[in-house]
Amino acid sequence: GGWNYMNIGIILAGGIGSRMGIVDKPKQFIDIYGKPIIVYTLEAFDNHPEIDYIGVVCLDEWMDDSKILLRKYEINKVKWLIKGGMSRQESVYNAIIAISKDVNDDDILVIHDSVRPLVSHKIISNNISSAKKFGATDTVIPSADTIVKSLNGLEIHEVPNRSELYIGQTPQSFKFELIKKAHEIAIEQNKLNVTDDCQLVLNLGEKVKLVMGDKLNFKITSFDDLLLLKAIIKLGKTEMV
């Protein structure tokens, strides 16, 4: 028999939510209808039959709260609670180090923002199958809007062709060996604040395949995102799909 390779969700909850203007709590811990945002996200992975284990990367001072939430909401697949770094890149690398003794080279890491709580079953499934096949994959949606490029924030410098542009989401999913190598090389090259794991893989000269996301898989960064999330959850996601 062949190996049974594992699929591991890595949930990035290390952000401090500085853009939200809510000082006392990072946005992933804000309650929506009695449940913190991060719990919706974790449930999407916990309920997915192809996800074997989950690692949660979070700020040191929110570790205890996270443990309480995992128990309260019966999130059973979390195997690692990992201390977040000063940047997204450092947080992901901390996760890679933390799980390395428990995983194989061909296991798949599905790296996802904790503040994208409406990630669908299908998006996770497609990430896993694409990463297994190609080694690296990124979730995107076509750009419905025209993107305008400005170098100074005052005037238009270019209007790139919309058909070539996509909006990046997460998950970003990789074979463990590949993403580990990508991070190690970036550190060697002193590229230390890359906000996107796919860029690190491209830096190795490897290809990254596209997987289609959807509009509901949006990132909660501002107050109006919270309003949108509340409206969608209240309506019931099922009615909308």
Image (spheres, rainbow, N blue to C red):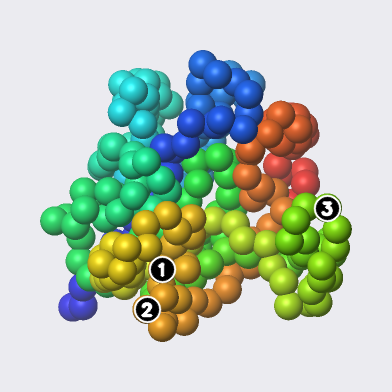
Camera-nearest residue between 70 and 114? 114
Residue type at tag 2: Leu
Q: Please give left or right for residue 13 compared with residue 102 in the image.
A: right
Instruction: Work out which residue is located at the far left of the displayed protein and give it.
Output: 101
Residue lying at 58% horizontally and 49% vertically, measured from the top left: 119
Image coords of residue 24 (percent x, y): 51, 16
**In the figure, is residue 233 to the left or right of 179?**
right
Q: Are marks 2 and 1 in contact (CB under 8 Å)?
A: yes
Q: Which residue is mark 2?
A: 204
The amino acid sitting under disc 1 is Leu
Question: Dot 1 corresponds to which residue?
Answer: 200
Q: Position of residue 180 (x, y in %)?
A: 28, 65
Label 3–label 2 contact, CB within 8 A: no
Mark 1 element type: helix
Q: Nearer the viewer, residue 76 or 198?
A: 198
Residue at the far top in the pictured view? 24
